[in-house]
Structures are given as structure tokens and as C-alpha cells.
Amino acid sequence: RQVNILKELKDSDHIIRFFGVAHEDSKFYLVTEWMEFGNLHEYYTDYSEIIDWNTKIKFALDICRGVAYLHECKILHHDIQSTNILVNRDCKVKIANFGLSKKFSDITRNITHNLENIRY
């Protein structure tokens, strides 16, 4: 599911860029762009004393823009947290880890199915 969703998300600077899948020893690996500073939780832990308010606001806006883009694509992330936001060397943040993500259509189909099974 994660690969299918990542393939659809090509037009945003706020979503991790996906290049493909690598396979080795019966294991599969997602190949994405490199984000030098790791995730936002690690970045904040390591650099909290030097991160100014302008940078924090920029991070928040970039995350909101990423979520807005996902919603335009009719995708719900379902796991936005600091460990799923990655930071590159230019202090640009991008949303990653789409393992729990779902298309709106999948969610609506489940709701419709559940409504049909309700007895009153």
C-alpha cells in the first residue's frame, strides 16, 4: 500500500521523494531521497537550543502544506508525528512513512460497508 501511495505523490516539495524499491535477500527496501538530519524528533533533540521561532514556524507551515497536498490527493496519512517528518541539510521538512495511509475512497467504502451492516 505504501508504495502505491508514494507513486502518486510526485508534485510536492513537502512529501519525501520516492525513487523505487530495492530487493535483497528476500527483503524489500524503499528508496527515497536522502534527508541528512534524520527525523524531526532527532533534529529537535540535537539542535533545540539553536532552533529559532522562524524555523519552527517554517517547519509547521511546511508540514501543513504537506498535509494539505495529501488531502488534495485524497490521502489520509494517519500517522503525522515528529518521527515521520524528515529534515534535510537546508532545514526543509518533508512528510514520510505512509505505512498507515489510506485513500479517501478506501475509508468511505469501509464506512458504507459498516453502515449497511448496522441493524436497528
Image (cartoon, rainbow, N blue to C red):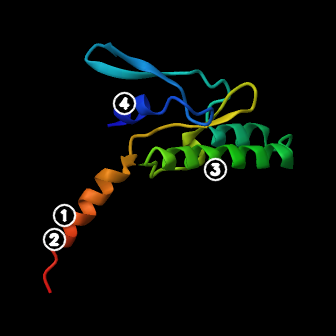
Image quadrant occupied by the C terminus: bottom left
User: For mark 1, what is the residue?
Assistant: 113
**Of 84 and 13, the residue lying toward us:** 13
- Label 1 sits on a secondary structure element that is helix
Q: Amino acid at mark 3?
A: Cys
Measure the alpha-carbon separation of dots 1 and 2. Answer: 5 Å
Q: Residues within 10 Å of mark 1 (few under 14, many from 20)?
A: few
- Badge 2 marks a residue whose secondary structure is helix
Reading the image, the residue beneath label 3 is 64
Residue at image position (30%, 59%) is 108
Q: Amino acid at mark 2?
A: Glu
Query: Which residue is depicted at the point 46% across and 48% down?
Result: 77
Residue bearing mark 2: 116
Determine the image quadrant of residue 112: bottom left
Q: Farthest residue in the bottom direction?
A: 120
What's the CA distance linking mark 3 and mark 2?
35 Å
Q: Nearer the N terminus, badge 3 or badge 1?
A: 3
Of pointers 2 and 4, the one earlier in the residue sequence: 4
Marks 4/1: CA–CA distance: 26 Å
- Residue drawn at x 56%, y 35% is 15
Look at discs 2 and 4 and give the one toward the viewer: 2
Give the CA distance from mark 3 to mark 1: 31 Å
The residue tagged 4 is 3
Give the image location of residue 101, x and y in percent: 40, 46
Rendered location of residue 110, percent (x, y): 25, 59
Q: Are marks 1 and 2 in contact (CB under 8 Å)?
A: yes
Query: In this picture, is 28 found above or below 58?
Result: above
